[in-house]
Amino acid sequence: MKINMKSLYLETTRPDDYRDRRPYKVEKLNTLWALLIIICAALLYGVAVVRFYSLPKPLDENDPQNRGEFIAARARQDLKKLEELGTRVVGSASNEKQAVELLMKTVNEIKQNASDLYEIENLVQTVSGGLVLGPSASFYDSIHNVVVKFSPRNAVSNSSLLINAHFDTVPTSPGIIQGGGDDGLMVAVMLEVLRVLSASKTLLQHTIIFLFNGAEENSLQGSHAFITQHEWAKDIKAFINLDALGNGGKEILFQSGPQHPWIAKYYTQYAVHPYANSMGEEIFQLNLIPSDTDFRIFRDFGHIPGLDLAHCLNDYVYHTEYDGMESIPDGTFQHTGDNILAIAKAIANSPELPDTSKHASGNLVFYDVLGWFIIYYSDNTGVIINLSICAVSIAVIIISLALIKHSAEVTYVELVFKLIWSLCVQSASGALATGVVVGIAFLLDSVDYSLSWFSQPWLLFGLYYCPFVFVLGMIPSLYLNSRFNILPLHFAIQLLLHSQCIMFISVAIIMTILQIRSAYVVTIAIMFYTLTVIVNWVVNIYTRPYLWLLPHLIGQILPFAFYGYLSMISNSTFIPLSGRFGADFNAEVLIAFSQTGFAMLMAGFLVPIFNLFKRTKIILSFFMLIFIIFFIIAFTSLAFPYTTATAPQRHSVYHTKRTFHAVDGSVRREDAGYYILTWDRRSPGIIKDTLAKHVTLQNADKDCSSELMCGLPHYFSGMRSFVSSGFWVDAKSPDLEGNPTLTLLSKEEIIGLQRFTFKMTGTRQTQIFIEPISGVQLINWSLPSKLPSESNKQDDAYFLMMRFGGDSVSKEFWLDFKVPEKNNGSTFNIALVGHYQDRDDKLTTEFKQFLKLFPPYAALVATQSSYERWRF
């Protein structure tokens, strides 16, 4: 390419009269160079995608390189045996007997082949109790855990490491939830880790407790039962919790500690395949993810530090009948097994384990770089790093301004004025680009075409990245060609890049002040940009119109790939999650807004340089053309969100018999119908389109003003927030066996106090709602937990969950109410809800026909239930 040296000289010549200044006319680079940069960016993103999906080679027993390593093939066989038991709901024979027997048998086989260096004890814990989590009280009766104690023979230490996973599955019907991903895979990994350790000839320093808990899907009851009641729990000083938010892929470390950075260090130092991000911990604690794990129980009730790891890929099939081992690659077993084996051995040999309280200080910032290696440091160090990088960057920008002032022969006042202009232009571009993207999201949502990207995330590029880049680049382009630009083009672009850096610095400082550890995400962009500015000084090419671009682009390679990798992690988690945020939550806007963040991080330091190339506006218009094409696609069948089996739409349908009693105990109302719970933004529209032509749909909230908890059979407390978008269809009564009953045994009157004693006979999954009448307070009960706080009540009612793992499904309890002196009327309302989760063969013919009305891409949770309400 021939460069006119005369023009390069002229472009740095300062006009004699400021009033006569015009935009500089320069010979720009060929447009093909811009195309090359775009292609390179696409290839870098491809690298991020490959790294995101990469898994290690799985091993089998015949592998000649096998030397006491985790064997994926054996773990898969363990999972296959567990899956063959079918759905394992708390209270079912498959969960309480068959799964327990299988686990005990497998552990006994491992014991027979164990090394003489270790002792292995295994037992079944049958336990009852209760706890309060958020707005609900949870009670369990005769649930089962399988517990294994793996101890060095003649051990001198009583300290133990706990490794936990659950073998029960979420309730569903029809269809069989095999629980391959949640959480059978982790159970299989634990069995293989135990198998490998038991055959080892190397002695561990401390004991490892393997907890196979049998009641996680019911408000984390199994882990609570163990950590609060088992005799081995008192010696546990740290834990590793293994769970799932998906099916397959890599397991990510997303929570650690808290306030125990030492345990996260062991992950960072010993994980064979690092995949971790402390940003996940902060997101999880904001309750943006509608799930919880046993990590919470061990942390809050056991008061011990730990690690929380989970598979998050393919959340589409999480808690559906499609969650089976056939979609889990062998590499997933190997990835998880290698990591857990190495980390467990390291912590079990750690000097910190006997007295972890000595090491309880601060949290850790950690993140892996494309799975190659992991970076970690304390949160205090993170503050220093963030502020130091910001300070250095500010100093570099100031020095850069001085150098530009000297080269461009402008005054400091003029240059500062231009920097302010550049900062305003770049800030306005970013704000407007974000506004345009969010506006597109609102538009798509308003016409009921949201979630077009649900099963096809590639649509996000055209719908949101492209318009963002177009707006982000077009406004600066117009500015650089206006009379307001008095600087040579390359200096003007450098000011825009400095402005972008100043914006990032502001964000990083604010996040650091707010003690947000994820500030490192922005600090990385600042650091690499600052380094390239310094490099340009050192080699003295910052004044060269084009040559300075080379270090700048090289400096963007690693950050671009890193942010692409982060976007893959984020999208693979939140896009499937948008299918269960509820119909009242605008997931379209959330996803669109998240894309603007990643687009700014990846494109913020790249888009301004398009102005160095010919036909800048045509280059930017290319992105707008892509958007138009994708926007049109969003309204076609190509962008329909759901696919059968791989990306289904969730629907919960409760065939419910309802009975409402008057104050005198007589039945004042009785009916039956289907309660349809909608899980995502498009559910109401699809329900109307597919079902309204066959049945009469009523709003599910039609009884909310008159009946306790809307007169609906809520299975968990969070279901109350879904009612406004749900539906009710009148129907014949379900065929129920052993309807739940509530019998008042006695009522005792004490001054200002009334005690009601009841006998409840329910199902294995029973809920009780209690609503004191205005002025009355529930102050105590005989149930095995404290009362939920007043602030945690829903609709002024207490939500109680009862789960029965044994043969008995009855319970006696009393309730104490504080009543006003002049109270001569009723004291409280109470409702008893029963669910029949393991009766697929008992669904009525009418109900089965109704379920066939749903589209083939629907994943149904179809359940028979009862709701009965009294006033006392």
Image: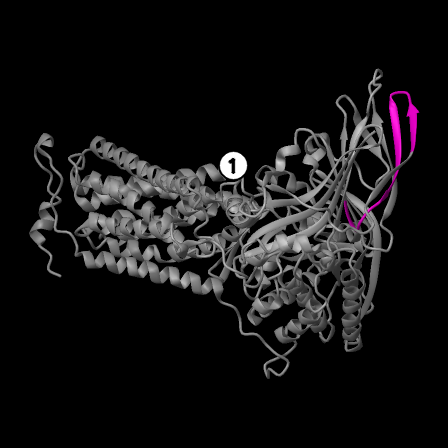
Tell me how many marks there are. 1
Q: Quadrant of residue 507?
A: top left
In the rendered image, residue 267 lying in the magenta stretch gets the answer no
Task: Find residue 795 and report its horizontal and vertical position in percent.
Answer: 68, 31
For the point 88% across and 32% down, which residue is it? 756
| Magenta residues, dominant SS class | strand
| Residue 248 in view | yes
Give the left or right position of residue 423, taking residue 566 as reference: left
Indicate the colouring scheme.
one colour
Circle 1 sits on which residue?
514
Residue pictured at 76% horizontal, 61% vertical: 95
Q: What residue sits 39% from the left and 62% below the top?
A: 46
Residue 296: x and y in percent read: 68, 47
Placement of the N terminus among the 4 image quadrants: bottom left
If the image is split into quadrants, where does the C terminus sit? top right
Query: Residue at image x 49%, y 67%?
Result: 54
In the displayed structure, 180 sits above or below 628; it is: below
- Rendered position, 275 above or below 523: below
Q: Is residue 93 left or right of residue 688?
A: right
Asked whether the viewer can see residue 294, the reply is no
Which amino acid does the dot numbered 1 rest on?
Leu
User: In this rendering, would 539 be left or right of 137?
Assistant: left
Q: Nearer the viewer, residue 187 or 193?
A: 187
Range shown magenta: 746-766
Residue 730: x %, y % from top left: 65, 42
Q: Position of residue 771 (x, y in %)?
A: 75, 31
Q: In screen coordinates, is 457 left or right of 335?
A: left
Mark 1 closeness class: few <14, some 14–19, many ≥20 residues within 10 Å: few
Helix, strand or loop for disc 1: loop
